[in-house]
Amino acid sequence: MRIAMVSEHASPLAALGGVDAGGQNVYVARLADLLADRGHQVTVYTRRDDPALPERVPLPSGAVVEHVTAGPARVLAKDDLFPHMPEFGRHLAGTWRRTRPDVVHAHFWMSGMAALAGAEGLGVPVVQTYHALGTVKRRHQGAADTSPPERLGIEQRIGQSCAAILATCSDEVRELARMGLRTARCKIVPCGVDTARFTARGAAARTPARTERHRLLTVGRLVPRKGIDVALTALTRVPDTELLVAGGPPADRLAADPEAQRLLALAHHLGVAERFHLLGSVPHLRMPALIRSADVVLCTPAYEPFGIVPVEAMACGTPVVATDVGGHRDTVVHHRTGLLVPPGAPVQLASAVRGLLADPERLRAYGHAGRLRALSQYRWERVADGVEAVYARVTATDPIPSGAR
């Protein structure tokens, strides 16, 4: 198939860890590569944010990233891209009139907006993956939500107009139903993990130098909704334990990051600064070793559309303590691969962590069960199978038998 992926703000070429660069970038990059490896012609359309970027960048898999000029060729905050989506859509329409794709897969709501405009009148089915929903964001952030006010209505219209919705977890399907969308058109296909790279075997990172303390690790963008302040507050009740945070800008730019400085100030106020380490962005290749170095991985956001970090931790055989929200409810099996705790509850979080750290046998059992779950449910090949099957359905073609690949 000729597959067009639209990912307006999350380029597969972007460095991870920035405010708007995370799980969606990984998802788009890995899926594009896998589908290209299976013989499909894959083009990923993403917004040009640097005038020096070439128009097209071939990936080793054979997929191609095409940079679309829509708005100024500089980095813009994700929520500032909305006015430039009509221009993005016009570019797609012109490109697809010349070479019609068989299927379009839009990632995020603004990509869906541009993709539907580009595909209009061409008879090309559009598959939508939201990655995050405006209704959930507004519910949790309220007045602090910086999304354009049009977002909720557009997300609903996308869901009504697209050929299929690829949801990443069961909680998202329930939310789509509350939006009045037909869940019969939804298919749950979770995000995936590279289980050959994220493995329980291998070296463990020792930076900063490992002491006799227990080690907790949280991974993610430095934004308030990730709940790192909750983990910090819990640390006051977990003695002889350090907390490492991987994410945000590079280490040499943390001093200019407002959230990093807020967290450091909080750590000093709470008296745990000596046990708190901001690592800055960590290259994805180094992440498995860092995860293996931890006794427990903490995932403490107030809400989480899917959350790839718990899956990566489980693949590394590291137990997870996560908030009982969103995709965590699908990925983390309570009392088997880790523990679920209420969001915004540092006392309960600390209690859960202390109980695990005091029980090495349970830590090992959770780690082993997590690895098995990652292998059985979240391998990228399984994700690609699910996505490919949806493409085949909306294009009315037969799925490719696995033995024929």
Image (cartoon, helix red, strand yellow):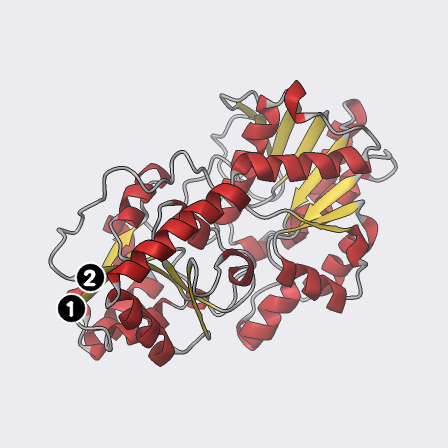
User: Mark 2 falls on what kind of element?
Assistant: strand
Looking at the image, residue 89 sits to the left or right of residue 274; the answer is right
Q: Is residue 150 visible?
A: no
Residue 32: % across, % down: 58, 32
* Cα distance between the residues tagged 2 and 1: 6 Å
Pick whichever, 140 or 292, lies toward us.
Answer: 292
Looking at the image, residue 382 sits to the left or right of residue 404; the answer is left
Dot 1 surroundings within 10 Å: few (below 14), some, or many (20 or more)? Answer: few
Where residue 45 is drawn, which disc sits there? none
Pick whichever, 402 or 221, lies toward us.
Answer: 402
Q: Can residue 201 be seen in this view?
A: yes
Please tell me which residue is depicted at 66% across the width and 46% down the height of the picture. Answer: 111
User: Mark 1 falls on what kind of element?
Assistant: loop
Please tell me which residue is depicted at 64% across the width and 64% down the height of the picture. Answer: 134
Residue 253: % across, % down: 27, 52
Looking at the image, residue 292 sits to the left or right of residue 88; the answer is left
Residue 48: % across, % down: 55, 37
For label 2, the residue is: 214
Residue 117: % across, % down: 78, 43
Pick whichever, 277 or 324, lies toward us.
Answer: 324
Of mark 2 and mark 1, the one earlier in the sequence is: 2
User: Tag count in the figure?
Assistant: 2
Dot 2 surroundings within 10 Å: few (below 14), some, or many (20 or more)? Answer: some
Where 201 sits versus 66, above or below? below
Quarter of the image with the N terminus is top right
Quarter residue 392 falls in: top right
Please tell me which residue is depicted at 37% across the width and 50% down the height of the picture. Answer: 368
For label 1, the residue is: 240
Amino acid at circle 1: Asp
Quarter residue 205 falls in: top left
Q: Do the residues labelled 2 and 1 touch (CB within 8 Å)?
A: yes
Amino acid at circle 2: His
